[in-house]
Image: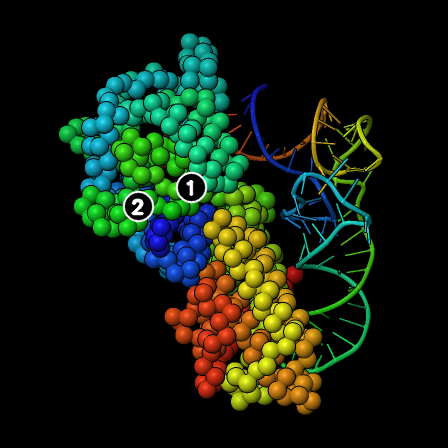
Amino acid sequence: MNNKNFYISTPIYYPSGNPHMGHAYSSIIADIFARFKRLEGYEVLFLTGTDEHGLKIQREAEKNNKDPKKFCDELSEKFKDLTKILNLSNDDFIRTTEKRHYKSVEKIWNRLVKSGDIYLDKYSGWYSISDEAYYDEDEIEEINGKKISKSSGSIVDWVEEESYFFKLSAWSNKLLDLYNKNKDFILPVSRRNEVIKFVEKGLKDLSVSRTSFTWGIPVPNNNKHIIYVWLDALTNYLSALNFSDDEKKYNKFWPADVHIIGKDILRFHAIYWPAFLLAANLPLPKKVFGHGWILSDDKKMSKSIGNILDPIEIVNIYGVDQLRYYLVKEVSLGNDGSISMQNLKNCINNDLANNYGNLCQRVFSFIKKNCSNKIPKDYKLENIDTKLLDKLKKNLPNLIKLINNQNLNEFIKSVVQYSFEANKYFNDSEPWKEKKENPQRMRTILFVACEQIKNISILLNPIIPISTNKVLDTLNVNPKKRLIKEINNLKCFEHDKELKDSDILFNKIENDN
RNA sequence: GGCGAGGUAGCUCAGUUGGUUAGAGCACAGGACUCAUAAGCCUGGGGUCGGCGGUUCGAAUCCGCCCCUCGCUACCA
């Protein structure tokens, strides 16, 4: 019951090319949840990494005249760089080419063989080399004596390949049970329905080995085969716990609390992964959250349209907190979301610079000029003050719930609301008038403003950690007190210390058009 | 084709079990103030809630039909 551990993962990324906005988005939202759980006092394991096997990587490596491992070393490094650029708080970075991963994949494989869920058979079907895809009988047609794919028009050949199979079909009912009993297992709900409908149609056994290429983990005791990349890749979530030989870490963090993924890999996480685990008699992750895609000006990003938004470039120009904030504010988590440079600028200027940033600035500079640069301690709270503070305090359980239900958008909306209110409070209280008429009142207003800035900063900390830490540094709030439970604890300030110097938090962005 | 989701202000969306003049943010216009990044605060315009029909004292909210958009439809990940 007192389990204060939390395990969250991003997908492991396929490094066949450079990191892009989709990777950044998955990572950022996972990071936000990880950071929030830490603020709640949890011990968090936040995992990300790279998925490095498979035909595509092998091909890309060959194209670049590189050994696949070396090829992956270079690209994986770029994904590691991205974790720094995005200021991710990941505790580990797993690569599927690591020894610890090989060992845990082999362990899973052996368990599946032992349980009788893996068997050797033949895979056969109409295969198009150019499409790299198999087609069903009804997806092909015969023209001039040649079989071709209806959709792509490419020639297909009948091929037969020896393959190991996983008895996926045997698990349909167990999976449906799982979806039924755990309404939260697949989120958002729309995705859950998709998966259920899909499974209800019945599942075929899954081919889980390949002999047509070599870049992968060999099947134990049969080196002719390598293990199917998804069985390989999904196991990373266990490898990072040293599944094969460290029970302590495994027991502490498994099952995972949530796998954050993109909707494109939902099936693998919501069907294959729990099926593998069920068959291996291992506990299942508690939640799989499939987010939508990031579109640029309502279109999928592509080189030919020229609408690619590069996360690294945006971070370089506008800053990492700015990108993080914008992505989670603008995109409704779970749905596809459209982003644009114009909206990014508006968002930075309105929410960050004018609202939160300027709130801090106006309060801090007022204190500097009128209170010897120290947060007043002789405050006497009046109705308007407690009303402001209590509103946030009372809503706190609800805010926590929003995060734990992955309702990031509502969460941000609420927090921004507090920032509005704090600005209004400052306006309405008119400390510049009280300065002459009632200095005591002025000091109270400034204390309350600082307290609310502290509270808002803690709440925004998982989203914009660098900026909020600057604010909390300015306020001399001990890093150990930057926790959810310290919200509305009026004793976090060291009133004898002067405020640290603070620069402009968020520069406004000039519109050049 | 089959299954599913959705169409609410210029844009992004909220609208709980049907109930008084349909809301928020952004964008736009005006006003008073000055502590602050010419920021903040106040006020305002703007919507036949996809269309038609039905149930009801009353529907964005329930039912039917139609139009439009999007997602899933198995081994590339």
Q: Nearer the viewer, residue A398 or A107?
A: A398
Q: Nearer the viewer, residue A273 or A1?
A: A1
**Residue with the mark numbered 1:** A288
- Between circles 1 and 2, the one closer to the viewer is 2
Q: Is residue A130 visible?
A: no
Is residue B22 depicted above or below A191 in this figure? Answer: below
Q: Residue furthest top?
A: A145
**Residue with the mark numbered 2:** A254
Q: Residue at x 22, y 32 (%)?
A: A111
Residue A344 in the image: x percent, y percent?
Answer: 57, 58
Q: Quadrant of residue A228?
A: top left
Q: Residue at x 65, y 74 (%)?
A: A383
Q: Residue furthest left?
A: A221
Q: Residues within 10 Å of mark 2 (few under 14, many from 20)?
A: many
Q: Residue at x 24, y 38 (%)?
A: A105
Is residue B67 depicted above or below A215 in this figure? Answer: above
Q: Quadrant of residue A172?
A: top left
Q: Mark 2 falls within which chain? A: A
Q: Residue at x 52, y 52 (%)?
A: A402
Query: What amino acid type is highlighted by mark number 2?
Result: Trp
Q: Residues within 10 Å of mark 1 (few under 14, many from 20)?
A: many
Residue A439 in the image: x percent, y percent?
Answer: 63, 88
